[in-house]
Amino acid sequence: MTTESPTKTKKEEVTKVQKLYLLKQGKSLVCQLYVSIRTAQIYDRSNLVYERQGENLFGLIKALLEKEQEIFVKSKEGYLFLNETRLKFSFDGYVSSKFLMETFRKLQFESLVISSPLTAEELDEFVFALAHADMECENPFESLQKRILSSNIQHIRIEKFASEWDVGDESLPENQKKLAKKRFFKTISVAQEMMESGRTGRSINTVKSKRAIQFLIDQLIKNETNLMSLTSIKNFDEYTFAHSVNVCVLSVSLGVRLGLSKRELSELGFAALFHDVGKVRLPLNILNKAGELNEQEWEEVRKHPVFGVKTLLSKRSLDRFSTRAMVVSFEHHLKLDLSGYPQLSFKKDLNLFSRIVTIADVYDSMTSGRVYAKTPLTPDEALRRMLGKEGKAFDPVLLKVFINMLGIYPVGSVVILDSGEVGVVMKANPAELSRPEMAIIADKFGKKDKMETVDLTKIDDKTGKHKRTILKTIDPYQYKLDIARYIY
Ligand SMILES: [Fe+2]
Ligand SMILES: [Fe+2]
């Protein structure tokens, strides 16, 4: 089995180029921020000297935002980071980086987050707020925060604790898994927060979710297994939010396979996270109904794609993210042959993102035992049923890539082996789809205490045959197995 796939090499190349870009731009940004704040401390906003520095800073940030969706400057443990890339300063950048770190420290914030569509006015206002912030008062952070919130600054925010996203050294494999878990659950809470604000009629602040998605994408590019295995846990109380995050992870993973750019992946992730946002406008008794819905209730449910468009429209400003999300919300139940809902009186091709999200959505719903089937289907059974509708409901090519990505035995599948043991699939094996990596959870006598990871590609020296082979999948619910226990 080879470990080096061509896509991985390509991905590594992209990451390397992106890192170099961030290093270079990061240095310029720190220098320009320093100069702009310093100038703002001396001159008025209308003074030509400041105007020039303000323009330079805006130009730099605009160029970065075109590539990065969001700029995230963090000061931590004596270093500055731009979108998770640690910036290195030689002598010439020393003063400006020290100044910035000191400003962050004195004003008690760890990170500065800038998102699109930023205006030059907002940026100037922010620079002046920083330049004249009261660092000696009791709560410098709160007073600066107050000033930002009461002004027109909508696309810049400061964050006191970014630590909720961190777990320490990201390069350690054990931390990677922890990090994936942390980010996954954090995204669920962000999704919950967004949708709650949609429910109460407040306009949705999408900056947080964009950032959460950025983290998920970075994580997926590094190691998709950790996040994908989390999507197989289905026993969440807050189903809608967990479902949204699952659909987001599965859609973005599929997007990565299709070679979409980072920018496209962010838009896809955003649209996937909010595909069901219209459900917040449905009555709670329908949303949480345990039994089957009657026709009248179904009629209500069928309104959620259009409700989604309306909810997204109520956002303070419309950008590429929300317009894409509107299309996906509207189209995600249409089906490839347009036999779904809402009913259309004209023919149209479904957007690529809608075709991706539909697949992830139906797969997650089927395996969760909601909406499509009362009891959850095993992952392989769900894929089998979806293949039966290929071409009618789903884009056949995308569905094939999706199945290839999950493997014929997706992560979380419970199987019986020819050794009599019971195992849970932990990781797909693209080189040999029928031999994924698994954890044995019971021996042939049904003992369940010890868990052991095994490699199904191993050959028995004596017989020359595989040591273990999958016989069939079983339904974990029937055997009352809690897969989450093994995935965690
Ligand atoms: Fe939906
Ligand atoms: Fe959905």
Image (cartoon, grey):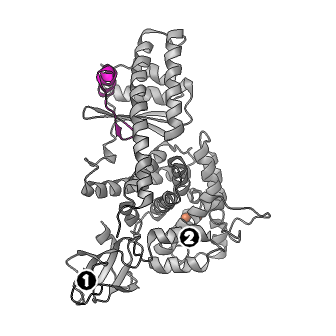
* Residue found at x 40% / y 44%: 16
Question: In the figure, is residue 483 to the left or right of 360?
Answer: left
Q: Is residue 97 magenta?
A: yes
Mark 1 closeness class: few <14, some 14–19, many ≥20 residues within 10 Å? some
Q: Residue 217: horizontal and vertical position, in percent?
A: 44, 52
Report, in whole angstroms, how far the alpha carbon at label 2 lies from the one at label 1.
Answer: 33 Å
Whether disc 1's CB lies below 8 Å from ligand 2 is answered no
Residue position for label 2: 399
Location of residue 227 with respect to 476 vertically, above or below: above
Q: Is residue 44 left or right of residue 417?
A: right
Front-lying residue, 20 or 382 = 20
From which residue to which does the magenta span run? 82-105
Residue 488: x and y in percent read 30, 65
Within-10-Å neighbours for mark 2: few <14, some 14–19, many 20+:
many
Give the number of the disc on residue 442: 1
Q: Is residue 376 left or right of residue 119?
A: left
Residue kind at label 1, given as amino acid type:
Ala
Of the residues under marks 2 and 1, which one precedes in the sequence? Answer: 2
How far across and how far down the image is residue 13, in percent? 42, 48
Instruction: Name the residue at 30% across, 58% down.
Output: 177
Residue 320, how many percent across, how many down?
A: 60, 44
**Secondary structure beneath label 1:** strand
Q: Residue at x 44, y 18 (%)?
A: 36
